[in-house]
Image (cartoon, helix red, strand yellow):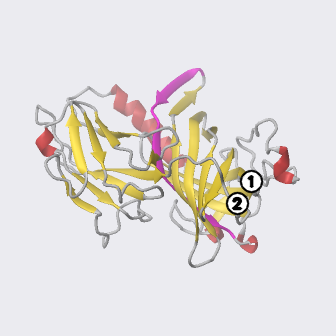
Amino acid sequence: MNSYFKSLTLFSVFFFSCQVYDAPPEPSVSFPEGGAYLEGEGIEIVFSEVIDSSTLQLRLWDVERNVENEIPQNAKPTIKKCLLKKCDTSKLILKKNIATLALNEELSKGGKSYVLEVQSGLSDKEGNTTAINYFFDLQFRNAPMQKSDPVEFDNGVYILLAQVDDPIPAVLTLISDIIVLEDGTFALVGAEGDEINGDPKNTRNPENLIVDTTTQGYTVYATGKITSIGGKRTLESDTFNVTIPVGPLDVEMEGVRIFADILKNVDTGKDQIEGSLSFEKVTIINGDRRNEQGGGTTALIADFVPKELVPTGNPTLCDNNLCGEVTGKCDPPSNFPPSQICE
């Protein structure tokens, strides 16, 4: 994963030293706090400048992106062609440089996840036109409810994966110990996992992952709540920060939050976590110099790992082992994990 950040740093140096040119409009999605939309909530797409409205065209996919982080070739879009004048059974409106996509009631139910595609050919008023498609991961959540049933969960180690495209390209792989109490309180400690044996960077195969025990490794600590209502389990973390060492630099992700559904994997019968990871800000630190960038949201998935396949050296919650064999960034918060987690 760290090679991605190295590429980003070099790219930033060269990019900002180049002459400014009149770039085509760039879309971004304005995500709500927590990274997931309430059911029925409109999706706000913000453009870097006013666009030629006739060139705006969207597609919506109800699929998981493949190992190349692309839409599978055999996939069919949920909405094939969404224009201002016609968007299937949904509605798209544009005011100045902000478009709002209001999905119909069925598509915007809580628990639904999508990939939104802003297609190439998007132009500004001067005719500067995009040559690439932009993709954004979206998720809808249920309206908040007060009362939860007792929560059941397969406690243990999970491989948690999230691929970030914007504003930084990165693959986050965390070998994570998760414990959930009956009242839904949960704690998570994770360590960076590096791929081996020629597997891709976004592998979730525990047999081809190792804990990064070099000085470039890092750990993650999170708490939050899981609710269970009518058999539907929903996870929402508290906000937390992550510091990732990249050579002499530190990359800080601030205001990180996980929102996800907990499902049963049909192949293993164990719990699987599917949802989104959002962050409010990214800062690249080089000594006293700080380069701040915006936040984003991406899809997240986590698979249960059988005990015999857990990579060695991973941190654990309840046996004074919050760093595992990580020698890089490991700074557990005070009073972590909550005392009741290990009672």
Q: Residue at x 38, y 45 (%)?
A: 41
Disc 2 crowd rating (10 Å Cα; few below 14, some 14-19, many 20+) is many
**Which residue lies under the disc numbered 1?**
183
Q: Please tell me whether residue 207 belongs to the stretch shown in magenta.
A: no
Q: Quadrant of residue 243?
A: top right
Q: Residue 58: horizontal and vertical position, in percent?
A: 24, 52
Start and end of the magenta stretch? Answer: 288-305
Q: Residue 162: horizontal and vertical position, in percent?
A: 52, 53
**Which residue lies under the disc numbered 2?**
151
User: In terms of secondary structure, where does tag 2 sit?
Assistant: loop
Residue contact at pointers 1 and 2, CB within 8 angstroms: yes
Q: Residue at x 67, y 49 (%)?
A: 225
Of the residues shown, which amino acid type is indicated by label 1?
A: Asp
- Determine whether 201 is above or below 144 in the image: below
Of the residues shown, which amino acid type is indicated by label 2?
A: Val
Q: Please tell me whether residue 290 belongs to the stretch shown in magenta.
A: yes
User: In terms of secondary structure, where does tag 1 sit?
Assistant: loop
Q: Nearer the viewer, residue 297 or 182?
A: 182
